[in-house]
Each structure stands twice: as structure tokens, then as C-alpha cells.
Image: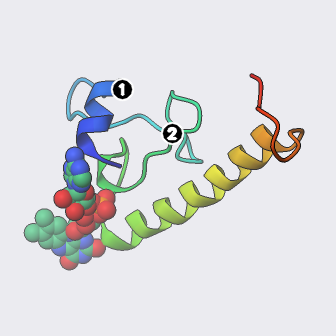
């Protein structure tokens, strides 16, 4: 995630400026996920950051599926 986007749109933790996330890398903004060193509680090791990224990708896919499940092609999505 771009740091400038993060600092403008998301609440960062007071001490280190990291983004709080849940285990599915969700941030407090719906549809926005954070992975890697920028995430609070990251162990800041390359392999763990790659795992975060994979988790975030799966979570984002699920988010989009749930959000757009009921919409038909060509129709605007409400809500
Ligand atoms: C000196 C050093 C040695 C390390 N050695 C090891 C090691 O031996 N083993 C290990 O597992 N880990 C090591 N690490 C940690 C590992 O490098 C990090 O945990 C990992 O790179 C984090 O990946 P990331 O994708 O979260 O962040 P990053 O690799 O920092 O990637 C973030 C990217 O976002 C870009 N970016 C930032 N802001 C913006 C913006 N506004 N717009 C566009 N792009 C932006 C940055 O330029 C960067 O390319 C080391 C780290 C350092 C500093």
C-alpha cells in the first residue's frame, strides 16, 4: 500500500505510524487492505510480508465477491 494514501486516509497507530489490521489484513476502511511492514504487528520479515500479501489478496477477492454477488452485468451497484 502506498504510504501517502495510508497517511491521508487511514488512522495510524500513535507510536510507530503503522496501520492497524485484523488477521485478514482488513483496515478500518471497507475494501482497503494493508500488508507487510506498514501493518501493525508485522514481524517485518520478507516471507511474512509475502504471506500478508497473499492473505490480503484472498480477503480482497472475497470482499469483491460479497459486494458484487447480487449485481447483474451493466447495472450500477447500490450500497
Ligand atoms: C537493511 C534491511 C535488511 C533486511 N534483511 C532482511 C532479511 O534478511 N530477511 C527478511 O526476511 N527480511 C529482511 N528485511 C525486511 C524486509 O526487507 C521487509 O520486511 C520487506 O521488504 C517488507 O516488504 P513490504 O512490501 O512490506 O515493504 P517494502 O519492501 O518497503 O515495499 C514498499 C514499497 O512501497 C513503495 N512506496 C512507498 N510509498 C509509496 C508511495 N507513496 N507511492 C508508491 N510507492 C510507494 C516503496 O518505494 C517500496 O518499494 C530487511 C530490511 C532491511 C531494511
Answer whether residue 9 is visible to the viewer in this image.
yes
Answer whether residue 44 is visible to the viewer in this image.
no
Disc 2 designates what residue? 32
Q: Residue at x 86, y 39 (%)?
A: 71
In the rendered structure, the answer to whether residue 41 lies left or right of residue 79 reads: left
Label 1 element class: helix
Image location (x, y in percent) of residue 8: 28, 26
Instruction: Report, in whole angstroms, how far the alpha carbon at label 1 lies from the one at label 2.
Output: 10 Å
Q: Quadrant of residue 6?
A: top left
Query: Do the residues under discs 1 and 2 have CB atoms within 8 angstroms?
Result: yes
**Mark linked to residue 25:** none
Q: Nearer the viewer, residue 27 or 23?
A: 27
The correct choice, above or below, for 33 with respect to 17 in the image is: below
Q: Residue at x 59, y 48 (%)?
A: 24
Q: Is mark 1 within 8 Å of ligand 1?
A: no
Disc 1 designates what residue? 9
The correct choice, above or below, for 44 with respect to 63 in the image is: below
Q: Residue at x 51, y 39 (%)?
A: 32
Amino acid at each position: 500500500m502506498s504510504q501517502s494514501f495510508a497517511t491521508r486516509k487511514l488512522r495510524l497507530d500513535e507510536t510507530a505510524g503503522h496501520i492497524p489490521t485484523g488477521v485478514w489484513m482488513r483496515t478500518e476502511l471497507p475494501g482497503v487492505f494493508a500488508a507487510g511492514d506498514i501493518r501493525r504487528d508485522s514481524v517485518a520479515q520478507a516471507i511474512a510480508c509475502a504471506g500478508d500479501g497473499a492473505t490480503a489478496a484472498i480477503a480482497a477477492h472475497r470482499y469483491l465477491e460479497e459486494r458484487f454477488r447480487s449485481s447483474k452485468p451493466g447495472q450500477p451497484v447500490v450500497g
